[in-house]
Amino acid sequence: MKINNLKLLRETKGLTQKELAKISKVSERQIISIENDNANPRYSTICKLVKALDTKVEKLFPIPDSTGIDKPDGSQKNK
């Protein structure tokens, strides 16, 4: 199960990992690790990514089932 929407949000903005790294000041290696669910980013890193992608934390790291929100656009999942 995917725990974050970083890749989806990045691609929606038309950014490469390298471009997002430059904009967010987060290393490309860390972006790759986060996209592959191989890293637990610090709060400061999450804030940088949220700002660079002009999004909300909830869209980057949705909480499935407890809120029903599981899509980057904030829409409810089908039940």
Image (spheres, grey):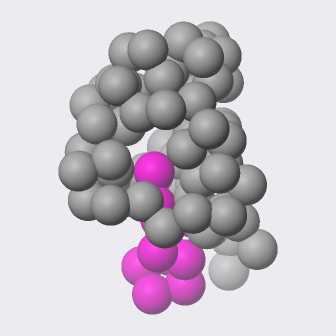
Does the magenta-highlighted stretch encompass residue 76?
A: no
Q: Quadrant of residue 47?
A: top left
* Horizontal arrangement in the rendering, residue 45 relative to residue 10 (left or right): left
The image position of residue 32, as x and y in percent, is: 67, 41
Read off the magenta span.
Answer: 60-70
* Horizontal arrangement in the rendering, residue 51 relative to residue 10 (left or right): left
Residue at x 67% of width, y 64% of height: 38
Q: Residue furthest bottom?
A: 66
The image position of residue 52, as x and y in percent, is: 34, 25
Residue at x 45% of width, y 51% of height: 60
Main SS category, magenta section: loop
* Horizontal arrangement in the rendering, residue 61 relative to residue 9 (left or right): left
Query: From where the camera sits, is residue 12 visible?
Result: no
Query: From where the camera sits, is residue 75 visible?
Result: yes
Residue at x 41% of width, y 33% of height: 26
Q: Is residue 70 above or below residue 36?
A: below
